[in-house]
Amino acid sequence: MKRYSAFAVFREGLRYQAGWERAWRSPDPKPAYDVVIVGAGGHGLATAYYLGRNFGITNVAVLEKGWLGGGNTGRNTTIIRSNYLQDPSAAIYEKARSLYETMSQDLNMNVMFSPRGVMMLAQTEHEKRGYLRTAHANAYQGVKTEFITPDRVRKLCPIINIDGPRYPVLGALWQERGGTARHDAVAWAYARACSNMGIDIIQQCEVTAVRRENGRVRGVETSKGTIDCAKLALIVAGHSGVLAEMAGFRLPIESVALQALVSEPIKPCMDVVVMANTVHGYMSQSDKGEMVIGGGADGFNNYTQRGSFHHIEETVRALVETFPMISRLKMLRQWGGIVDMTGDRSPILSKTPLTGCYVNCGWGTGGFKSIPGSGWAMAELVANDAPGPLAAAFGLERFREGRFIDESVAAGVAH
Ligand SMILES: Cc1cc2nc3c(=O)[nH]c(=O)nc-3n(C[C@H](O)[C@H](O)[C@H](O)COP(=O)(O)OP(=O)(O)OC[C@H]3O[C@@H](n4cnc5c(N)ncnc54)[C@H](O)[C@@H]3O)c2cc1C
C-alpha cells in the first residue's frame, strides 16, 4: 500500500487525485482464521493491529455488523487523558495516551492528535479533595498532572464563569498532555494498517451465534456464513451482553445510551477541554469551530443510540451555568451511542468460561482514550492465552473476588 506523505499529496494534486488507492481491502470471509474479532470499533481494530505488529499473527478477521467505526468509536467526544486514580487504570490509560502521541507517524495517517490540555473542575470541597488525591496518586504513577488554582483556570480558559452562581470553581485537575484526536481517523488508521498486514476486515457481517464444542470455541455463524476460528475475541461495547449470551456466559455489564451534541461553528474561543462534573457537563471546541458537548449517561438500560431528551436539557443547563457566553448558541446535531458500564467503572479484558474466547468491554463512557493501550493489552492476552501486566488486574474474576478497581470519580460524566 502506498505511503501517505506531503509528496504524495503534491503528486496527486498534479494528476487530478486519480492515483489514490482504497484505504483498506473489502474481502469476502475465508472459511477459517486463527483469530476472529467481533466488532470493528477502535478496540477491535487496535487488537487486530497489535496481534499482527507485536506477535506476527495476521490470519485474523475483524467482523463488523455495520460499518467500521460506526459504533461508539465514531460517536464519542474524543477526549484523551490518563488522570485515573488506581494504579492499573493509570498504567493502561497512560500507555494509550503515550501511543496517541506518535500514532499519526506509527500508522501513517493523520489522526489529528491535539494535546491541548484537559481540566476537570473542582466545584465542591469534596471534589477538590478527590482531585488532590488523584494528583498525588498520579505523581507516584508517573502520570503528569497537577491541581491548579482558580486563577490558573481563568487564564487557561477565560470563558469559564469562575464565580458560578451555584458552584464556584475551587481549582481543577489539569493534565497538560491530555487532549483530543479525530475519532474516525483513529478507526481508519488502524483499519488501513491492519489491511496492509493482510488482516481481513469484513463489514456488513453480523455475528448471529457462537459455535462451541466440548467447552471450546469452534467458530461463529454470521450473516455471511459460517467462519471457523481457534480463538475468538468479543469486542462489541454496548452489545457485549448479547454476544456473551451467544457464547454461553453472562457479563456484569449494563448497556445504556450516552449522548453528545455540537453547536453551530463559532470563532476560536476555547483551546482546552473542560469537564464540570458537579453540574454534569463538558465541552471542547472542534477544529471546525463547533462546541462539542456531552453530559451523563441515561439512568436506565436501553439500546437506542439516541439518548433521552431530559439529558440534553440538563447538560445544556449545566454548561450555560459554567460558560454563560454559549447561552445563545444554536445546536446543530445530537446523537447517542450504547455504552457498556461495569459496577466499578473499570474495563474487562479477560479470558472467559469458554476456552479460546476472550472479552474486552466495560470501557463505558471513557474508552476512546484507551483504544491503543487496550488493543496492545488485548493482543497480548489473545496471543499468549494469558494477560500481560497491563490487563492482569482487569479479569472477570475480580467481580467474584470483590477486588474492584473503583474509578467512579474518574469516570461517570468525566469521559
Ligand atoms: C456520546 C459518547 C461520548 C463519548 N465520549 C468519550 C470521550 O470523550 N472520551 C473517551 O475516551 N470515550 C468516550 N466515549 C466512550 C467511547 O466512545 C467508547 O468507550 C469506545 O468507543 C468503545 O469502543 P469499542 O471499539 O469498544 O466499541 P464500538 O466502537 O462501539 O465498536 C463495537 C462494534 O461492534 C459491532 N457489533 C456489535 N454487535 C455485533 C455483532 N453481533 N456482529 C458484528 N459486529 C457487532 C458494532 O456495530 C460496533 O461497530 C463516548 C461514548 C459516547 C457514546
Image: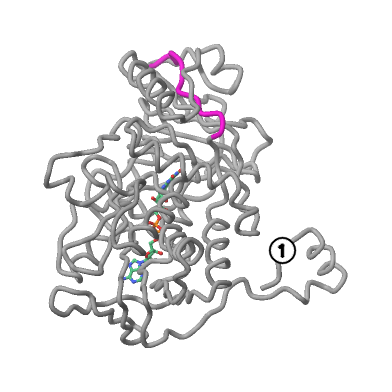
Q: Is residue 354 left or right of residue 90?
A: left
168 part of magenta stretch: yes
Q: Does mark 1's beta carbon lie closer than 8 Å to ligand 1?
A: no
193 part of magenta stretch: no
Q: Residue furthest right?
A: 14
As drawn, 378 above or below 280 = below
For the point 43% across and 47% down, the residue is 370
For the point 72% across and 73% down, the residue is 20
Q: Quarter of the image containing the C terminus?
A: top left
Q: Is residue 309 left or right of residue 106?
A: left
As drawn, 211 above or below 123 = below
User: In the image, which residues are magenta?
Assistant: 167-177
For the residue pair 331 and 108, the one nearer the viewer reads as 108
For the point 68% across and 75% down, the residue is 21
Residue 88 at what x, y percent from top left? 33, 39
Q: Is residue 340 left or right of residue 20?
A: left
As drawn, 414 above or below 92 = above
Q: Is residue 79 left or right of residue 84?
A: right
Look at mark 1 in the image and give the residue it sits on: 4
Q: Quarter of the image containing the N terminus?
A: bottom right
As drawn, 208 above or below 125 = below
| Colouring scheme applied when the structure was drawn | one colour
Give the residue type at disc 1.
Tyr
Residue 152 at what x, y percent from top left? 56, 15
Quadrant location, ligand no. 1: bottom left
